[in-house]
Image (tube, rainbow, N blue to C red):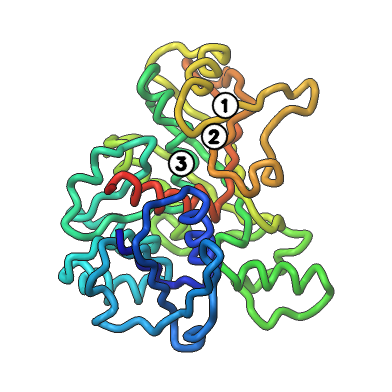
Amino acid sequence: MNIGVVGATGLVGRTIVRILEERNIGIHTLSLFASPRSVGEKITFLGEEYVVSPLTEESFKGLDVALFSAGGAVSREYAPIAAAAGCIAIDNSSTWRMDVGVPLVVPEVNPDDVKLHKGIIANPNCSTIQMVVALKPLHDVFGLKRIVVSTYQSPSGAGHKGVAQLESEIEGHVPELRISSHSIAYNTVFHKVGGINESSEEEIKMMNETRRIMHLPELPIAVTCVRVPVLGGHGESVAIETLHTVAPDNAREVLSSSAGIVVVDDPASDGYPTPLSASGTDLVYVGRIRNDSSVEHGLLLWVVADNLRKGAATNAVQILELLQ
């Protein structure tokens, strides 16, 4: 396949290139594109240096697939141009996620939806991806009735700006780049609040995307999204209510046998997933599996994943693999 990466010099773009190399994708040609300020930079792939090119309307001719990670404005303008040129666009922004004509895909959850594409496929939000990977096998066996989730998200989910703000504050400097008016270092901050019911955009994304990916349009979901001062990796405290009785041991058995999931659940020996232990991996880790006695059929989970990999770049590459 002839592959393009749009936004190749960003955090997710560079990770996409690395994962394409790691997963030994059958690539005939690789083309890298970025904004004018990054044109001319060099990125190594399979031992060869590739020069980053400017993105134009002609960039997609001859390409089979383009993986987009350059922000919503770029995706909105160029993904339809790619599709019109016969190049499938896999988009990491939120632009197309709720478009009824664009499938929103997590390969472990709804791989068949990829067949519905008309030239554009949406990659979900990072926090949504790891949660639905953990919840889909439980839903298949026990049925989901309600979800309550609180996230503990790395500022790396906001790209270079988030990491730069955290690192500057830890070093005692005033950040030149920032994603929050509050300090992130030694602190917790919310995403910008002000949407429906005073929810943040991130919280609304998780609610809407989860329902769409899992084909459960009426599923009750309550979400609180928080950024915490870790350089990489998202954690989630997930409380679910199921339709049928679910014992923790049964849940562990189901999760342990499911694709893309590793159960780490031995709290007596400090055995549980952490952002550091998930760093650099493509899996979703689940621990602290226990009963929630506040509801009739309740279960509590702790879900962790590398947000730049499984939460973004890896999921996009896995969608690419479904197209091969």
Q: Determine contact: label 1, label 2, CB under 8 Å.
A: yes
Looking at the picture, how far across and down is residue 57, in whole percent? 25, 82
How much space separates mark 1 and mark 2, taking CA atoms? 6 Å
Tell me the kind of residue under disc 1. Answer: Leu
Q: Give the mark nearest the N terminus, 1 or 2.
A: 2
Looking at the picture, how far across and down is residue 4, in whole percent? 36, 68
Q: Residue 65 appears in which quarter of the rendering?
A: bottom left
How crowded is the residue under tag 3: few (<14 C-alpha within 10 Å), some, or many (20+)? some
Looking at the picture, how far across and down is residue 164, in whole percent? 67, 72
Residue beneath label 1, please? 300
How much space separates mark 3 and mark 2, taking CA atoms? 10 Å
- Residue pictured at 58% horizontal, 18% vertical: 291
Tell me the kind of residue under disc 2. Answer: Val
Q: Can residue 142 be seen in the rendering of this structure?
A: yes
Q: Is residue 22 left or right of residue 278?
A: left
Q: Determine contact: label 3, label 2, CB under 8 Å.
A: no
